[in-house]
């Protein structure tokens, strides 16, 4: 029973995140570089809708129904992301998309393991299809982020607001910049706003997941303690004991943490920060940045 209850929880969260994924794909259509990319994004949104229906069907097959809050949560999270990311450069917005896809991929793999344990082959087949779809999307987004980093023409282009945000970020972070007092204060204010919005976006995604967990708990037939809190505490203690390569990392906001991670050149240092982040704030944008940096250092070795 506990395996089935956990499986139902993961199906509910996957449903919410998949509906968010569909909304994000539709938001990205306006940023497509050409018609071919627009058609691809529209197809991605349609496929995400199809996956949502399959997940909802799987929930019915295991004896429960999708909660009525899930569609609203998906729309609200996507709209919030769309509004907040306009105060960020394009690469930060794409890192947020990449973090969402990594969550979907990781949870789909976990769902497959739960389905095997519960002897539910139909759910296992669904999980395999989800893994295939999200693996392809992660690869596509990784290529887009790499194109943006190289300054090459990318499949997605920045909105006017994102271009302004990128210019401000470059001005704030430029080495040896000579900025007048008033402009310096204004740039600092905008940078602080970007950091706050990035943190808000991460918190919104985490809050949506928390609601999905609460709905699943409320509709489950068991109130037994699974003991996950003790595991988290253990992970946190181990991470706290290891010194981090970034001084004062625990005090950094999302934007500052991402910038610091990008300055790391040792894969072991990146791994240490990633482990700490996942056992503490677990901010999706920061986790995605660490994974991307680890991949870049690995490919460059």
Image (cartoon, rainbow, N blue to C red):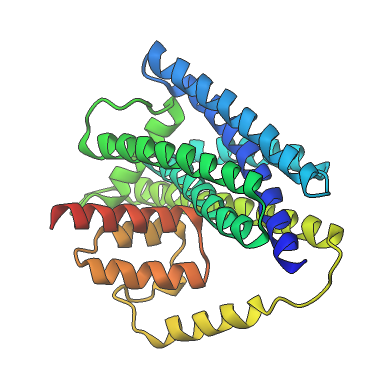
Viewer-closest of 213 and 122:
122
Find residue 7 and report its horizontal and vertical position in percent.
Answer: 68, 57
- Left or right, 56 with reference to 155: right
Viewer-closest of 56 and 269:
56
Find residue 132 and report its horizontal and vertical position in percent.
Answer: 46, 40
Q: Is residue 96 above or below residue 151?
A: below
- Left or right, 10 with reference to 255: right
Q: Residue at x 72, y 42 (%)?
A: 58
Q: Is residue 187 above or below residue 27?
A: below
Residue 227: image quadrant is bottom right
Find residue 254 and report its horizontal and vertical position in percent.
Answer: 46, 58
Find residue 45 and report its horizontal and vertical position in percent.
Answer: 56, 26
Q: Is residue 288 above or below residue 47?
A: below
Q: Residue at x 56, y 49 (%)?
A: 201
Residue reaching furthest left?
A: 301
Viewer-closest of 113 and 43:
113
Q: The N terminus is located in which quarter?
A: bottom right
Q: The C terminus is located in which quarter?
A: bottom left
Viewer-closest of 80 and 16:
16
Q: Is residue 252 above or below residue 79?
A: below
Q: Residue at x 50, y 59 (%)?
A: 283
- Left or right, 289 with reference to 232: left
- Total labels: the figure holds 0
Residue 67: image quadrant is top right
Q: Residue at x 49, y 44 (%)?
A: 131
């Amino acid at each position: 029973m506990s395996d089935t209850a956990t499986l139902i929880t993961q199906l509910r969260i996957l449903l919410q995140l998949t509906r968010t994924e569909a909304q994000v794909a539709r938001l990205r259509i306006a940023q497509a570089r050409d018609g071919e990319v627009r058609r691809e994004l529209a197809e991605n949104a349609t496929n995400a809708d199809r996956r949502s229906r399959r997940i909802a069907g799987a929930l019915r097959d295991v004896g429960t129904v999708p909660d009525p809050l899930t569609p609203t949560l998906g729309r609200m999270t996507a709209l919030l992301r769309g509004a907040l990311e306009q105060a960020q450069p394009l690469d930060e917005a794409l890192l947020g998309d990449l973090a969402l896809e990594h969550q979907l991929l990781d949870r789909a793999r976990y769902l497959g393991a739960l389905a095997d344990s519960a002897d539910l082959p139909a759910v296992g087949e669904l999980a395999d299809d989800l893994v295939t779809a999200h693996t392809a999307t992660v690869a596509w987004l990784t290529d887009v982020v790499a194109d943006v980093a190289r300054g090459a023409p990318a499949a997605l282009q920045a909105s006017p607001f994102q271009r302004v945000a990128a210019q401000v970020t470059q001005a704030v972070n430029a080495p040896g910049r000579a900025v007048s007092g008033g402009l310096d204060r204004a740039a600092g204010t905008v940078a602080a706003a970007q950091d706050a919005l990035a943190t808000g976006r991460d918190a919104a995604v985490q809050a949506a997941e928390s609601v999905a967990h609460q709905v699943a708990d409320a509709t489950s037939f068991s109130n037994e303690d699974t003991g996950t809190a003790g595991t988290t505490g253990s992970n946190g203690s181990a991470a706290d004991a290891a010194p981090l390569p970034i001084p004062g990392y625990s005090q950094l906001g999302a934007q500052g943490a991402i910038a610091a991670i990008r300055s790391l050149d040792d894969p072991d240092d990146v791994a240490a920060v990633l482990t700490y982040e996942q056992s503490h704030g677990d901010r999706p944008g920061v986790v995605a940045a660490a994974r991307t940096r680890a991949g870049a250092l690995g490919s460059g070795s």
